[in-house]
Image (spheres, grey):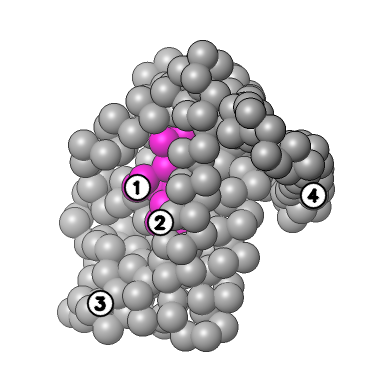
Amino acid sequence: MGTQYVKTNRAFTALRRYAWIFTMLVAIGGLFEPKLGLLVILVMAGLMITAFFTGRYWCGNICPHGSLFDMLLPISRNIKIPKFLKSKYFILGFFIFFMFNFSRRILSVVNQWGSFDFLDKLGIVFVSTYLMVLIVGGALAVFVTPRTWCQFCPMGTMQKLSYKLGKLVGAADKAETKITISNPDKCIKCGKCSKVCPFQLTPYLEFDKNNQFSNIECIKCSTCVKNCPLNLLSLEKKNEKIWS
């Protein structure tokens, strides 16, 4: 048998518990007031900036869609994410497909700059995109596992690119927090951290020489920290890691 993934609380802050309201406001409310879609520009800027310093922290702690998907956990099948959805080829292919269509729609609206309803037309591009993610991501959340969409989310890919740039210039090394184990020798390899991980990662098998989990896909959501039976895990900066 494969790993039995565990359904457990992932909303440890008010923001993570209620950020899904923003998704509904834009995706549904935007159909009646398209200018609400312009708020997504702030979201895109926010995730790119935070990713430069902290990797995919936005995905696990701020993302409105992520909040919505996690709220669907009680009714999710919560089964293993298909490998092909995690493959570099699929992620890259979907990113190119998504960005091509999104850019094409944006350019068609930009050509209408100065028209009376320009902002509405621009806003509806973001609204329809948010609605698509809500529908597709929501369906995947129920029939597979909540964070299935996040495996190939174009915004997640953009975050990883921003993060790599941050690593290149040294900004991420100073600011990023990572899952840290206080004493690897005490770890009983129960796999609980993997069983509750929204991305189905395996921290207990991947701690580096600094006792930190450096997988680029980690969204720093602290779900593994909250569920470690021996309380060995924490979210720390490199110079703050706990040594036994």
Quadrant holding the N terminus: top right
Residue density around tag 3, few if under 14, some if 14–19, many if 20 or more, within 10 Å: some
Sequence-first tag of 3 and 1: 1
- Kind of residue indicated by mark 1: Asn
Residue density around tag 4, few if under 14, some if 14–19, many if 20 or more, within 10 Å: few
* Left or right position of 9 against 120: left
Q: Which residue corresponds to mark 3?
A: 241
Q: Position of residue 102 (x, y in %)?
A: 73, 40
Mark closer to the observer (2, 3):
2
Mark closer to the observer (3, 1):
1
Sequence-first tag of 4 and 1: 1
Q: Are marks 4 and 1 in contact (CB under 8 Å)?
A: no
* Left or right position of 148 against 111: left
Q: Which residue corresponds to mark 4?
A: 96
Q: Are marks 1 and 2 in contact (CB under 8 Å)?
A: yes
Distance from label 1 to label 2 (Cα)?
6 Å
Q: Which residue corresponds to mark 2?
A: 57
Instruction: State the residue in front, 123 or 189.
Output: 123
- Kind of residue indicated by mark 3: Lys
